[in-house]
Amino acid sequence: MKKLRISELPDTTKGHFLGAWLPGANLTTGGLAFAKPGERSHTNDGPDGRDYHVHTDCEAFVILQGTGTMQINGEHHPVTVGDIIIVEPGEDHHLNSNANDPVVTLWLHGGDHRHKNQQPS
């Protein structure tokens, strides 16, 4: 896991805004997530309902609002507005939203191809 702040991002006009931390020339998938108060993401996502969630690529989480913890391989790391968490391949990860100040996150994956909506017709 890597943790940085939005204020640490370099000024760039080429590629994507996380180019130094999220491999690939493009943002390939992502979304905006509004967690419920106290919610834990990816619970019981593993095979046979086991409680782990991993990827073969990096994933970025940008904390846009609220507070919580990013659980990486069982260890909790506090997160707040302006934090960017880069989850490395193979790291079990869960975002735990604060019960009183739930998180809103932008989650992203990078790669060499573009998102399916950006492919030429």
Image (cartoon, grey):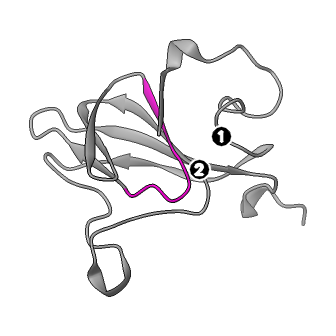
Q: Which mark is residue 58?
A: 2
Q: Relative to 55, is 110 on the left or the right?
A: right
Query: Which quadrant does the C terminus fall into?
Result: bottom right
- Look at 71% across and 44% down and name the residue there: 23
Q: Residues within 10 Å of mark 1 (few under 14, many from 20)?
A: many
Camera-nearest residue between 118 and 2? 2
Q: Position of residue 105 (x, y in %)?
A: 40, 40
Please name the residue shown 80% across and 43% down the image.
25
Q: Which mark is residue 22?
A: 1
Could you tell me which secondary element the residue under label 1 belongs to?
Answer: loop
> Which amino acid type is marked by label 2?
Cys
Q: Earlier in the sequence, mark 2 or mark 1?
A: 1
Image position of 37 with respect to 6: above or below = below
Task: Using a 10 Å C-alpha cutoff, classify the residue at mark 2 as few (fewer than 14 neighbours), some (14 to 19) or many (20 or more).
Answer: many
The reply to whether the C-beta atoms of the residues labelled 2 and 1 are less than 8 Å apart is yes
Is residue 44 shown in magenta? no
